[in-house]
Amino acid sequence: MVEIDAGVADEQFEPALDRFRRLGLAVRMIMPADDPAVALLERGGIAIRLVRGDARWPTDLEVPTLVPAWEVSRFSDTGWVSGRAGMLYRDLLPSRQGGRYIASHIRISDAGPVPDDVHFHNVRFQLIFCVAGWARLVYDGQGADFVLAAGDCVLQPPGIRHRVLESSAGLEVVEVTCPATHETWFDAELSLPTPDRRDVFGGQRFVLHRAAAATWQPWRAHGFECRDTGVGAATDGLVGARVVRAKATAQTPCATHDGELQLWFVLDGAVEVVRPDSSPERLARGDSVAVPAEMEHALETTSGCELLEVTVPA
């Protein structure tokens, strides 16, 4: 294999990527998915390593040191950028918590087939929660393709091959991944679905959580209940994801946490995040907040409010 390094200016990356594709080179790897800056393209015995600006070619899986930060992302304030496979991405963690985590609000505007290929991610963990609409997905070792509907969640273990086949108009998902910058590799040799059943990949178990079949249980604060997605058990406590809702007007006691990540994304209704040293932050549907460890905070909301909560550890 002859390897060629090709560095281009920021504005030349996408045109160069398209030009190599037109020449018949296939994309084997691209990163990051929300704003591609590095790509590996191959044809015959030639491999081209395309790098944008000052981006760095990846080595092994790198999980940067956590830099905790209070981060509020508002649906009305945040722009959308075009990412992989024609998907639109909105960044929920602009600081990336030092590069350790990425949380993306992703949408597909039009219904129909998605221009995706069989691929996998080099990650520590990755979960997908469907906020609105539906997507048809297929995974290695999981049988036939299936529909991920609003309220459903999947845990994509490290290295599991998968593909997005089609979606409804207005599909919205939230994706949370560690680390923030990671590779997406394409596997042209594998055809999905695969005949054999397999659930464990990279030490984690594939999870498909169905909202329609879920049971609600008391949450950690009075007046709230939650449905757990099973992600915590499947990752041996590495990361957890659950939907929290208020049964009536409710408020959590002012408290702190000692984890790496506590992220809330508003699925329905509105909530106020109260901190002793600042004005309350009112969050509506599509807004999110990350609360760092040791920061005192409380939630105030009314019946009908639903939140997606992602925590590390579970």
Image (spheres, rainbow, N blue to C red):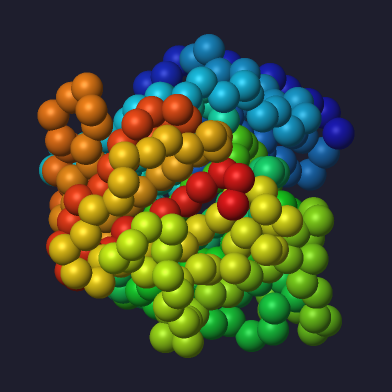
Relative to 242, 107 lies left or right: left
Residue 139: image quadrant is: bottom right
Residue 254: image quadrant is: top left
Q: Position of residue 223 (x, y in %)?
A: 29, 65
- Is residue 263 visible in this depiction of the protein? yes
The N terminus, quarter of image: top right
Residue nearer the viewer, 145 or 110:
145
Q: Position of residue 282 (x, y in %)?
A: 14, 43
Count of labels in the image: 0
Q: Residue at position x 60%, y 35% from top? A: 179
- Is residue 51 visible in this depiction of the protein? no
Residue 269: image quadrant is: bottom left
Q: Residue at position x 17%, y 37% from top? A: 281
Relative to 96, 278 lies left or right: left
Residue nearer the viewer, 227 or 158:
227
Residue nearer the viewer, 208 or 183:
208
Q: Residue at position x 40%, y 24% from top? A: 69
Q: Position of residue 136 (x, y in %)?
A: 48, 76
Looking at the image, the residue that sits furthest to the right is: 1
Q: Residue at position x 51%, y 68% from top? A: 228
User: Where 264 sits versus 138, above or below?
Assistant: above
Q: Position of residue 305 (x, y in %)?
A: 22, 64
Relative to 268, 190 lies left or right: right
User: Where 247 sits versus 39, above or below?
Assistant: below
